[in-house]
Image: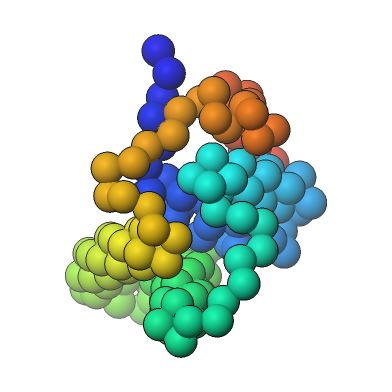
Amino acid sequence: MERRYDIHDLATAQVNAVRFAKKHPDLAEFHESRFRALALAFDIPDSAEQSDPGKDALESLAASSIRTLVGLHSPFSNFLEAPKNVIDLHARFGAAINTGIQQTDTAIQELLAEVLAELHSIPADRTVGDEELRRHGLDPSSPWPDELDYW
């Protein structure tokens, strides 16, 4: 059965392309290729010329949303190991912080999907399938690289 992809999948792919751009070249290439294939399947050209101030503002909002999503993490996420005082603080604040991050991530992902839809005149119910991705050079059945293999 063919999978269908919507504007949320496009938004996630764009965030991942930015998130992995400076990581291992295999990860960067995979996520950039996935985003490019989805963008082309949704009829978004490689380089869109902007002359409308409203579209410029939407481009800016999309870029800001992506930067925020890429940088969104818990202050505890930098600890592989931690002393007891940090562990105690995590016990007190970790769940609330993680809930807030999850809610913020969800809201910004929704915002980004709507911005992309408006920016590129994509109807909310439009989807593309595996075949469209294949036409644009991506085999959706191939396995994703495991980012833990690249640290």
Q: Nearer the viewer, residue 146 or 28?
A: 28
Is 105 located above or below residue 144 in the figure? below
Horizontal relation, residue 96 to residue 37: left or right: left
Residue 18 quadrant:
bottom right
x, y percentage for residue 57? Answer: 43, 84
x, y percentage for residue 13? Answer: 51, 50
The count of marks equals: 0
Is 36 located above or below residue 66 in the figure? above
Q: Residue at x 42, y 66 (%)?
A: 119
x, y percentage for residue 21? Answer: 69, 61
In the displayed orientation, state which residue is furthest to the bottom.
53
Q: Is residue 122 visible?
A: yes
Q: Is residue 76 visible?
A: no
Q: Residue at x 59, y 45 (%)?
A: 40
Q: Residue at x 54, y 40 (%)?
A: 41
Horizontal relation, residue 48 to residue 65: left or right: right
x, y percentage for residue 38? Answer: 54, 43
In the displayed orientation, state which residue is furthest to the front.
51
